[in-house]
Image (tube, helix red, strand yellow):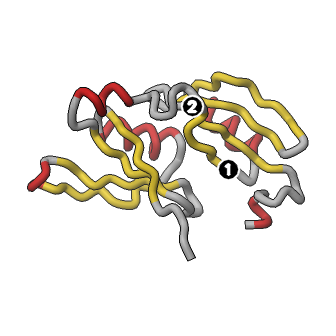
Amino acid sequence: MQRIAHVMVVVRDYDEAIAFYCGKLGFELVADTHQPEQDKRWVVVAPPGGGTSLVLGRAADEAQAAAIGNQTGGRVFLFLQTDDFARDHRRFLGQGIDFVRAPTVAEYGTVAVFADLYGNQWDLIEFAPGHPLAVANT
């Protein structure tokens, strides 16, 4: 068996990233360990319910800093699947999350695009019942 365990997100500052992902999106802080020999922290956050987690990596140089907020060249970067689109969309709006594309309903489900604190684009998506990727089928 194989699976993607973590995805690295380059961030400007550990604490501001934790505040956004945990405070606004409701993710859980899985790990926050100081690594003094490298002057960095091992910070891992995950959405409630598990799945692939994010490693929040502070940019270490100018090249990495240039990628903050644009890790995929302006395309949607990550896909946050939900079992209740309306609930999570409403909660995110209440947290001040910036939706850059309004919700749409398609054959595959309901989706809207939001930006994280750095501008990376995410899909918030609830797959339609019966879709092979719907939460009930995972």
Mark 2 → mark 1, Cα distance in angstroms: 14 Å
* Amino acid type at mark 2: Gln
Q: Which residue is mark 1?
A: 81
Q: Quadrant of the C terminus?
A: bottom right
Residue 121 circle label: 2
Q: Check contact, mark 2 vs mark 1: CB within 8 A.
A: no
Is residue 35 shown left or right of residue 87?
left
Earlier-in-chain disc, 2 versus 1: 1
Q: How many numbered tags mark residues here? A: 2
Mark 2 Cα shell of 10 Å, populated few (<14), some (14-19), many (≥20): many
Q: Residue 36 location, x and y as percent? A: 11, 54
Kindly indicate the quadrant of the structure image that contains residue 50. bottom right
Q: Residue 1 location, x and y as percent? A: 57, 77
**Which one is in front, 116 or 59?**
59
Residue 114 circle label: none
Residue 26 shows in this picture: yes
Residue 94 shows in this picture: no
Q: Residue 15 location, x and y as percent? A: 30, 40
Kindly indicate the quadrant of the structure image that contains residue 75. top right
Asked if 73 appears above or below 21 in the picture, the reply is above
Q: Residue 85 location, x and y as percent? A: 75, 43
Task: Please report the residue visible at 85 percent of the width from the left and 45 percent of the height from the top.
Answer: 108
**Which one is in front, 125 or 27?**
125
Say which element carries label 1. Answer: strand
Task: Please report the residue visible at 19 percent of the width from the left and 55 percent of the height from the top.
Answer: 34
Of discs 2 and 1, which sits in the foreground?
2
Say which element carries label 2. Answer: strand
Task: Please report the residue visible at 50 percent of the width from the left and 50 percent of the height from the top.
Answer: 27
Mark 1 Cα shell of 10 Å, populated few (<14), some (14-19), many (≥20): some
Task: Please report the residue visible at 38 percent of the width from the left and 55 percent of the height from the top.
Answer: 44
* Amino acid type at mark 1: Gln
